[in-house]
Amino acid sequence: MRLVTVAHGTRTAAGNLVAAELTAAAGLRLGVEATTSYVELCAPLFADVAAATTTPTVVVPLLLSTGYHLRHDLPAAVEAAPRADLVHLGGALGPDPLLASAQVDRLREAGATPGQPVVLVAAGSSDPLATADLEGAATLLAHAWGAPVRLATLSGLGQRPEAVVRAGDAVSPYLLATGHFHRKARHDALAAGASVVADVIGPHPLLVDLVCARAVTRWSRRLRSNRHETPAALTA
């Protein structure tokens, strides 16, 4: 098996490195070849990686919620690949308790205090299914943080940070890597009165756990459909 991840991509080089770090760590842990790809703005593009696939490949999107890329762009790239039968595409990373736990760590690192109200700020989407995912992520974060969490989005459906953030709130960017949305989230949150703005989730060890778990689950489903067993490297 080969692991391929696909991140959105950004013009900010440091943001693209997060996906590469996560992918390398997950590949090392699983003992498989691992390749990082991107939807846009950075090479290699997922469409090109899918088109060149010649070995069984599990694709783990490094996208935190459902949206146009997951529902349209990535499936279209798989369908267009000459060996589409070898490419096994997974779903969004979130919502997931591991993401919420990683966000808690980032909040604590930024100086947020127990019980402090939090606003989860996401990039946003025009897809109602994405809204449901984001609401689920806010619920999981509230449970992990132990205090109320409200949701704001920077684009698409939902309320903007200036309408949600209150003076003294902590803000948790629901973003994997730095880039345009990260800068906007921080600016808008501070302008609205936030006292603490956490860092992006980044290459947190819990994210490596999550990528590995998603890869194993997707590969196991593929193998069950073919009546094979999971390779030892994936169950270690």
Image (cartoon, helix red, strand yellow):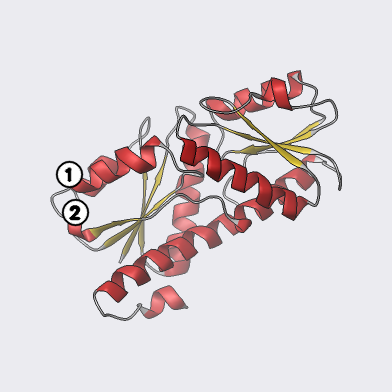
**Rendered position, 163 above or below 213:** above
Q: Residues within 10 Å of mark 2 (few under 14, many from 20)?
A: some
Q: Is residue 122 left or right of residue 73?
A: right
**Rendered position, 91 above or below 161:** below
Residue 213 visible, this orientation: yes
Quadrant hosting residue 85: bottom left
Q: Position of residue 128 (x, y in %)?
A: 48, 36
Quadrant hosting residue 226: bottom left
Q: Is residue 51 left or right of residue 109?
A: left
Disc 1: which residue: 80
Disc 1, disc 2: CB below 8 Å? yes
Amino acid under disc 2: Ala
The quadrant the N terminus occupies is bottom left
Amino acid under disc 1: Ala
Residue positioned 86% across, 46% down in the render: 115
Quadrant hosting residue 191: top right
SS under mark 2 = helix
Disc 2: which residue: 84
Q: Position of residue 37 (x, y in %)?
A: 35, 44
**Rendered position, 222 above or below 169:** below
Residue positioned 36% across, 72% down in the render: 220
SS under mark 1 = helix
Which numbered dot is residue 95? none
Q: Residues within 10 Å of mark 1 (few under 14, many from 20)?
A: few
